[in-house]
Image (spheres, helix red, strand yellow):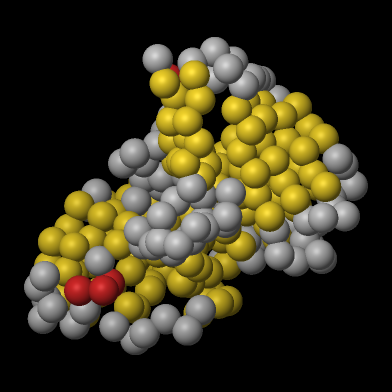
Amino acid sequence: ETGVTQTPRHLVMGMTNKKSLKCEQHLGHNAMYWYKQSAKKPLELMFVYSLEERVENNSVPSRFSPECPNSSHLFLHLHTLQPEDSALYLCASSRGLTNTGELFFGEGSRLTVL
Amino acid sequence: GESVGLHLPTLSVQEGDNSIINCAYSNSASDYFIWYKQESGKGPQFIIDIRSNMDKRQGQRVTVLLNKTVKHLSLQIAATQPGDSAVYFCAETNNYGQNFVFGPGTRLSVLP
């Protein structure tokens, strides 16, 4: 148990569906992240939030929409996805943005787009 | 620990032997490095870290070596056990900060 909880663990959706991934951290951290893990690529950073403010958007298509209502919760809203978006989506948190050590990851949400 | 085509490099070791997993990093300004372990169906777990002012750091059964001259990082696992079977990633960042760059990973298989 890393203190970062992701739901759902598995999600199958059609290209016209709208769904959301949820992440909650119980560590009192101030920064939260979304990463994409595909079978053929290293971990890719998607979004970074610090104290509920988005500080980085790594050229992610607009069909992915993050939301951070407070420092403990992070969402990734999904809309009109493509089959190539099928991947493991990992949420992570850290104490802050700099000089704060490692990232703590959740177990991931495995997304399949049909 | 570098990508070979589209496949993860794989290291197979006999149970009880020592394992060495390598990683070449890209940014000479990186000053903080982490090794993560990812078991099947789970998220990456922190194993050990090292800052650029050190060459070596030891944990429980694991040692990380940093060679800044050739930008190389290695993870040594002593007396490898079946539970060590996983994919291992290195990650680098500068300013001990959030912009971690992850390597492609190496799959470790422990043979009985």
Q: Considering only vertical position in the picture, is B50 above or below A112?
A: above
Q: Position of residue A75 (x, y in %)?
A: 34, 65
Q: Name the image quarter holding the C terminus of chain B.
A: top left
Q: Is residue B46 left or right of residue B84?
A: right
Q: Considering only vertical position in the picture, is B12 above or below B44?
A: above
Question: Closer to the camera, A34 or B24?
Answer: B24
Q: Considering only vertical position in the picture, is B61 above or below A69?
A: above
Q: How many marks?
A: 0
Q: Quadrant of residue B61?
A: top right
Q: Is residue A101 left or right of residue B112?
A: right
Q: Position of residue B16 (x, y in %)?
A: 54, 13
Question: Closer to the camera, A20 or B1?
Answer: B1
Q: Position of residue B50 (x, y in %)?
A: 76, 42
Q: Position of residue A18 (x, y in %)?
A: 16, 75
| Residue B5 appears in the figure | yes
Question: Closer to the camera, B98 or B19?
Answer: B19
